[in-house]
Image: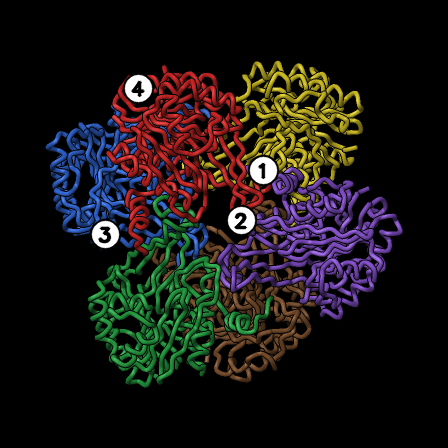
Chain colours: A blue, B yellow, C red, D green, E purple, F brown
């Protein structure tokens, strides 16, 4: 009976202290990350009843994922994998300033989630969902997950939910062509598309004026809504023949990871709560800007904080 | 026989690591803060014999306040509260970049200091003081402290000390009107006024050219000196018909809390040591700029460091 | 629709690193503790649907309590206090070996929970509860809470729940006589009594053979069950004319705080799940022994771990 | 041209702080462990030219293994795996006192080493080796490694090295029967056998008087030397018709992991350096006892420290 | 005008975390240690007006010594060394259980204090002292300090103070013969001798019944009082023809360093406060036992804690 | 048989956490630094066989230096000092933003290295070296080292190596005049000179157009190559009548210490590997820019990372 259900992989996230290198550090900060649970944390914290659907190893490592999600108010609906080779995907994140950049090492092959089938997942949570969300990472993780993703999108829609999908292209998982093909196989089951302008260009070969690109996608794939994120250039959304633009809110970036998921979470939470598209875009941008100031993948924010960002911008009130 | 005596509350200060949130952190950094002891630490470190007068719970938490102050050379003159409900005020500080901002949660109600009366305080330390300092936070903490603040200001002056007062408006303690009234009740006992331009506008309804504002205060309340701090715009002082201006020294801000107190401490230390008002303003601005680079409320600096800031600025010597 | 509902105060728990003293430490480990939420964490982790009922400040500090409880599967039912002086009780815990001992400093006066009334609490959670649990700490916190505790015990029973109560005498909250009187006022509403042998002697003046003491309490106050904990000497329970004894399981104690609550949680979880009294006592003793190896108030254990302790003891299987 | 060459898997080792649980911790201490590199660290630190032969992912995680080994004077001879799915095995270690015990979670499936073949490994390091060492963990990791282990043992012997093998039974990798069969397939290529008494009983079905058991193994499988470790009961060795006994040195155990490898390392280092079997047993026992006081898998010790343990015991010299 | 003045070297103390080795650690805990300042901290904390006399580099490292001492209430009387090669002695401390033991590496050669002469030291603090204390470490540090120690002992006595001296033999500083000779040169200026039984045997060649040994020293060197510490066997004191014995209080030892200084501090504080010799021995033993539970050289204790240890023992009151 | 041999002092480097002051911190991060070993780490990590030649105390502190160097692939060739007063130089580093600046306190007097003579050093490592490198810090440390530096430069050249030297002026070791004289005594034995523009001006009195300055040095002292580093203004090199310029790569500076050594290391590694001077300058600048993002003196980088910086700049590829 959750308003929002998300489906995908969540990994253990391990990071050395700032300035230290993975090759030498003794200290790893253990958090977690995964596009769809990141979105779920944002929507739950912003007030939407939220369920995260996935498969996890039946171990302390699996339990720490659900414990953390529950702490943010997300309801985990999990198929527990008690097989001998059950494993939790892991990713190593080394923050580095320019010119070193931030380095991500994935160790996610054969994670328990890659074998998840609709039969074993507690899909009854889809029954009364308003929105079902997943991202382009999920189908890329395994052929099984590709099938499962399609089945869940289909099932969610049949159950009456609106479906939302973020391209989230990951070059370490598949090539642009494979991704493009994979996306297009799912698009018929998608109502709301989130996409980074860069991914649209890389995988779908579309570039140019963002509103035209968005409208092209909407028209060609028959989406209800298309939201294009454009990094420092803000975001645009098109729907019902209207187009909306939203600039970013300035932020002192402490940790950029999870910003896109915070954006999606802010948008979905506001829309599910009855907000208009422009309202949802502002909510999305404000949630994303707050996320940047926080260590970790998760948008550990409150509705009051999100609204303060929006109001300050609108009304110029200083603290 | 201290040159400077300050009076006020000191709290335990608890902060999560950078990027972490109070809601979730396991690690709190424990320091301390309080406008008047912050000033005392600055003046003591900069060479002035300094006493801090207050009331504390007779507990490890109370003793950690005096231990820390003594380590900086401040002499604590304390009424120890051994009642069952003796408590130390606490404040939680969460550093956040834009747009999240820095969040402060006070838990200071019914702290031992709020019941301090002149009778129980070791007021003999006022006897040979050159300067007695307190701030507008102290009278706002309780009606008892309001009375005690007035009594101490009066007593200090009678004992031959010059009295100094910083408005330090705290909206969580009283309204602008209450504060304005409270300040005006104390002004007859004050010789040197420190005030943030913003507080003067909020609580006393005066704004405009800073030197005119300062002169207006000096004239209307018969102060000896008025020092107005103006954030990034520097500071001004008026006294004896003269006006002085002091720009800020650029600083990489690590922790902005305590900057104003470092300013006051730098000023008082230099004046007590025989410096002119412009000398004292430069000392104040340099101490404040160094404070910004240091974690915690306290200006853990040396006279040599303060002078290096001033000289570098004056003479353009690079490191 | 929870099997178990507990009611009481939860505090922020702050501890210095081992070997360090509160008076001097810079590092405080932030966890949480409270008899009734400690019990709730144990019962939830051991499989019982559990709700914790209380009142908290509407702040990051209040939210961290519910976030932590949810992470263990407890459902918090909370009256949020958004008044200006809302506060979370705090306790400082300094671990020390012999002869220094472990030092606890409470700073819990005027916590939000002390004003909790039945009207404002979400008492609908009592409707379908199997067990309602609180401890002797709760009525000692304020006259309001004393009334509320009585009302909730009464209400729970009326709603069909069995009521359970642990004396949990705290000498810093009331005298033995006050406590004894307070307990006796509540006993008419209690079905299952947990009591430390020491508290029974101190507050109720009963000592001697533990089974006779337990039977005396059962008979005189008309309890359904009395469970007496006897430190290193294990525990006894009496009910329905039967008496049961349970030795302790040996443990390397890392942190003894919360052991008693783990015992109660283990007992209630097993009983609610249909276990016999001897089963429940074994479960209780095993949960308590595991708790001793874990830092913090909470019994972060799994049913499998508890059962392994019991089985190993029964069958002598070594690892 | 190394005196000692060891071959096997090395994993990243991740542990929460003492008293904390994997399910909840934010802080993981990152070290490394692997029976054969543990042995290599001990032999290198105790003065033997030592090479560790293995396969690792070409990544910061792989490089941290070789960096750490080199820091102890081990020369890593590594086949670098630059395939997309190259991975480093990981193990999670949660220290717990009784009755919780120490918990180990392996995440080592499909580690790069599991595909290592003699062709790709830099086996030229075997050419001038005095001793080649591996353990029963290695052949259990994959069929490929089982073949490779046999080939390397054979090749080492052909190249003139003495071969040494430790049963090191791991029930999470294979059953006792599989292990017994696997061991017996390798025994024809082994000169020196190390075995825990417990493993001999579990996998080879031999028990009884330890010297008789050792002699039985020596006779039946035609070993040159058999060393049996017996936990708190010390160790025995048989060779050339002689039997030797060595008690353990008392130790305050901080971390028991790696104790057996330290024993083997001490033995091999001393033998390679010309020591007699009793000398080597004493060295082994002393190295193992020192290891127990040190956090991590590795025996970070010096020859002087090992000798001090032996001398103190022999001569009763106190510090 | 201090009751107690101590004179000696204080070093920076650097320790790796428990279980880690100096050779590999990244984290060093920075505290401080020095027999005479350790004693001063104990006496100051236990209520005696205390001054510590020494010479320090005029640097942040020197200032941290005085800051820490002041935090415990000790008044530092320091000759500040602003020469280019001024340095603070350092010692590295690695805690290790058996059989590794605790390792201490001194890096104290040419520390500023080694050049301290009576002329440059602020010896006016001796004027009204009741007790002057130093230990056998000080004269061993340099020929200059040997002269200075003798001069200060003489001067203190002339100024009316009682002089106290602890052998504190350090084999890394001088041989037993050198030490014995050094001690005997100072004994004519000493009133109260503290000595470990072991040091008396090693350096002065006296052994046997402790009371006889103590009386022999008292008689032969004409001391007023001799206090012999005997490790686990407690302590004895002789004076005025009387002999007193004091057992140790059991303690869970977290850090044994500084225990002897805590003993001396407890003794001197109680004697200076008018306590009898048996009182002072009990105070000494209790302070020493508390010190053992605390990380670092310093006895961070309160009079109430010391008295609680004594009372508990005397009256058998449990907590 | 190393391509590159460097000679000089390596110190223990101790730093407080960011924002904390040496005067007050409890936590020191222990790393290491020394111009010549910093260079060696860079060249070894970038692929050159590298040996570091020096003298160290035979202690855990000495061993941690070689362990760390070996971990980066540097081969330490060390004269071990087992004298009683053997010591490792130490330096304290306090990072501070403007206007506080970064403070360095050296405690390096009488370090073991200061007594190193060619006779005791394992100079056979010079035999097949391509390049021998040292810096102007080494001869300034002691008269002995001044002689040894000259002897080694001479010996390296005689053995067929190219010699490289970086001025590295340190005002705390000698005056500009002493340094200038010291440099000029060594210049006849130097082939490749690295120099900061600022040091050339300060110690050699040459300023003006950087290429003219470089050519003047080359001509007057008969160098083969002169490389001038100019801070934010990049670097220039002159050789064989050609001049080359290299801008800096932008970097987010986390720790500037060691940047110059990373530059030299990048240059030497690339030249030794057959790169042209412009190639080497680019490599140098890229290595230096990466170093700035990393905590500590050492350039913990890989060739791939260095090349990515160069390529990105050349080809404008964004990540």
Image position, residue D247 (x, y; %): 44, 70
Taking depth in this image into account, of C218 and A27 the one nearest to the observer is C218
Look at the image and tell me whether residue F317 can be seen.
no
Which numbered tag is attached to residue F17? 2
Residue positioned 67% across, 57% down in the render? E230
Image position, residue C265 (x, y; %): 34, 35
Which numbered tag is attached to residue C265? none
Answer with the quarter of the image where residue B4 lies: top right
Q: Give the Cα separation between the discs numbered 3 and 4.
A: 45 Å
Q: Are marks 1 and 2 in contact (CB under 8 Å)?
A: no
Q: Nearer the viewer, mark 2 or mark 3?
A: 3
Q: Residue furthest right?
A: E158
Q: Is residue F37 left or right of residue E196?
A: left
Image position, residue D202 (x, y; %): 26, 65
Tag 1 residue: E317
Tag 4 residue: C157
Look at the image and tell me whether residue C202 can be seen.
yes
Quadrant assignment for the C terminus of chain E? top right
Taking depth in this image into account, of C45 and E235 the one nearest to the observer is E235
Badge 1 and badge 2 in a common chain: no
Badge 3 and badge 4 in a common chain: no
Callout 4: SS: helix
Crowd tier of the residue under label 2, counting other residues whose Cα lies within 10 Å: few below 14, some 14–19, many 20 or above: some
Answer with the quarter of the image where residue B19 lies: top left
Tag 3 residue: A86
Quadrant assignment for the N terminus of chain E? top right
Q: Chain of mark 4?
A: C
Q: Chain of mark 1?
A: E
């Amino acid at each position: 009976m959750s308003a929002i259900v998300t489906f995908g992989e969540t990994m253990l996230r391990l990071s050395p202290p700032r300035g230290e290198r993975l090759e030498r550090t003794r200290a790893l900060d253990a958090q977690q990350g995964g596009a769809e649970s990141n979105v779920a944390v944002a929507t739950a914290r912003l007030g939407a009843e939220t369920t995260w659907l996935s498969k996890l190893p039946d171990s302390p490592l699996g339990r720490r994922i659900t414990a953390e999600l529950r702490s943010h108010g997300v309801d985990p609906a999990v198929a527990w994998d008690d097989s001998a080779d059950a494993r939790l995907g892991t990713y190593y994140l080394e923050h580095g300033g320019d010119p070193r950049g931030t380095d991500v090492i994935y160790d996610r092959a054969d994670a328990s989630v890659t074998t998840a089938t609709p039969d074993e997942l507690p899909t009854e949570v889809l029954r009364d969902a308003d929105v079902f969300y997943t991202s382009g990472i999920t189908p890329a993780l395994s052929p099984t997950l590709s099938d499962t993703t399609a089945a869940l999108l289909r099932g969610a829609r049949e159950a009456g939910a609106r479906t939302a999908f973020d391209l989230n292209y990951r070059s370490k998982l598949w090539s642009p062509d494979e991704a493009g093909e994979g996306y297009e196989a799912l698009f018929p089951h998608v109502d709301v598309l989130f996409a980074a302008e860069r991914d649209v260009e890389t995988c779908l070969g579309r570039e140019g004026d963002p509103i035209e690109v968005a409208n092209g996608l909407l028209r060609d794939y028959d989406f209800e809504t298309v939201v294009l994120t454009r990094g420092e250039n803000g975001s645009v959304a098109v729907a019902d023949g209207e187009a909306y633009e939203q600039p970013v809110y300035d932020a002192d970036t402490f940790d950029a990871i999870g910003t896109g998921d915070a954006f999606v979470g802010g948008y979905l939470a506001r829309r599910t709560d009855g907000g208009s598209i422009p309202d949802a875009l502002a909510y999305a941008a404000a949630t994303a800007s707050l996320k940047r100031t926080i260590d970790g993948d998760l948008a550990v924010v409150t509705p009051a904080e999100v609204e303060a960002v929006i109001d300050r911008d609108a009304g110029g009130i200083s603290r």
